[in-house]
Amino acid sequence: MELTIIGLNFLYAVLGVILMYLSYRAIDRLTPEMNFAEELRKGNVAVAIFIAAIFLAIAVIIGGALN
């Protein structure tokens, strides 16, 4: 395997994680009446499923964009 391919894959993985974090923060700011972290601490399973769905949707979008 070429070293450049490994380097590009690592770069794409880091870029994907950064974009996932920024997307989550944007959604968090767009919904100021909802405190996701507090609801997760309370054990709200619906919020956990919602956040997981957001992460999956963002991952599909980022994966398609980086392909």
Image (tube, rainbow, N blue to C red):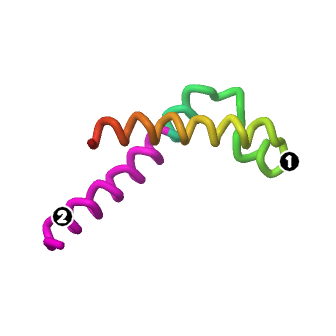
Q: Position of residue 27 (x, y in %)?
A: 54, 32
* Tag 1 secondary structure: loop
Judge left or right: residue 58 versus residue 49.
left
Disc 2 designates what residue? 5
Q: Would residue 61 be found to the left or right of residue 11 on screen?
A: right
Chain part drawn in magenta: 1-23
Q: Residue at x 52, y 40 (%)?
A: 24
Query: Which residue carries the number 1 mark?
Result: 42
Q: Amino acid at mark 2?
A: Ile
Taking the magenta stretch, the answer to whether it contains residue 65 is: no
Amino acid type of the residue that numbered disc 1 sits on in the rendered structure: Lys
Q: Position of residue 31 (x, y in %)?
A: 62, 27
Q: Nearer the viewer, residue 9 or 2?
A: 2
State the image quarter where residue 3 is shown. bottom left
Circles 1, 2 touching at the beta carbon (< 8 Å): no
3D distance between C-alphas at marks 1 and 2: 43 Å
> Quadrant of the rendered structure where residue 14 is?
bottom left
Q: Position of residue 52 (x, y in %)?
A: 63, 42
Q: Earlier in the sequence, mark 1 or mark 2?
A: 2
User: Is 5 on the left or on the right of 65, as rendered?
Assistant: left
* Quadrant placement of the N terminus: bottom left
In front of the other: 19 or 63: 63
Instruction: Tell me what residue is drawn at x 55 percent, y 26 percent.
Output: 30
The foreground one among 53 and 22 is 53
